[in-house]
Image: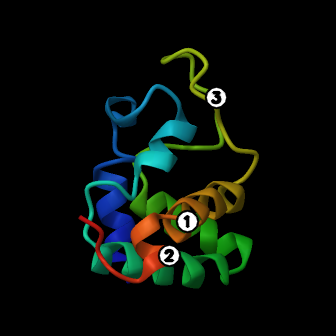
Amino acid sequence: MFPRLTNLGSSSFGEDPDLFGDTLFEVIDDAPRGHRLPFKQQTVNELRTLLAYDDMDLDRVSWAVLSIDPTVDPEEPPNWGSFPTLRAFWSAVLHAFENDPEVQAGKEID
């Protein structure tokens, strides 16, 4: 039901998300890069749908598509960062995708 979020869960937010940034916030900011505009737009739509769910369903879907728990502050890597809730995490991801220059322009930018 959430193929784009599942894709992010196996790449940017996968088991080794530190490959994509030094902090969780950097990983989120970098998540739209490297994806084409249709992927980004579909991700925005999936995130809006997910965030319309109640907290129980949002938690259930999050654990199915993510390989990490963004609500805990892990020991490694140090100063990685965390979010107070999964809703806060997904809201930050939505913000990153909605504010991507290509999404804002509605077209791919070379």
Q: Residues within 10 Å of mark 1 (few under 14, many from 20)?
A: some
Foreground of the two, 23 or 66: 23
Reply above or below: 52 against 39.
Answer: below
- The quadrant of the picture occupied by the C terminus is bottom left
Q: Quadrant of residue 89?
A: bottom right
Q: Is residue 95 left or right of residue 61?
A: right
Name the residue tied to disc 1.
99
Mark 2 vs mark 3: which is more N-terminal? Answer: 3
Q: Position of residue 83 (x, y in %)?
A: 69, 44
Q: Residue furthest front?
A: 110
Q: Identity of the amino acid at label 1? A: Asn
Task: Give the residue displayed 54% in from the left and 59% down from the top.
Answer: 96
How far apart are labels 2 and 1 at the CA level? 6 Å
Q: Identity of the amino acid at label 3? A: Asp
Task: Give the residue displayed 28% in from the left and 49% down from the top.
Answer: 11
* SS at badge 2: helix
Q: Nearer the viewer, mark 3 or mark 1?
A: 1
Q: Pointers 2 and 1 in contact (CB under 8 A)?
A: yes
Q: Quadrant of residue 71?
A: top right
Mark 2 vs mark 1: which is more N-terminal? Answer: 1
Q: Position of residue 18 (x, y in %)?
A: 39, 29
How far apart are labels 2 and 3 at the CA level? 32 Å
Q: Residues within 10 Å of mark 2 (few under 14, many from 20)?
A: few
Foreground of the two, 23 or 99: 99
Task: Give the residue displayed 49% in from the left and 58% down from the top.
Answer: 63
- The quadrant of the picture occupied by the N terminus is bottom left
Q: Which mark is residue 104?
A: 2
Q: Quadrant of residue 65?
A: bottom left
Q: Nearer the viewer, mark 2 or mark 3?
A: 2
Mark 3 vs mark 1: which is more N-terminal? Answer: 3
Foreground of the two, 108 or 65: 108
Q: Which mark is residue 73?
A: 3
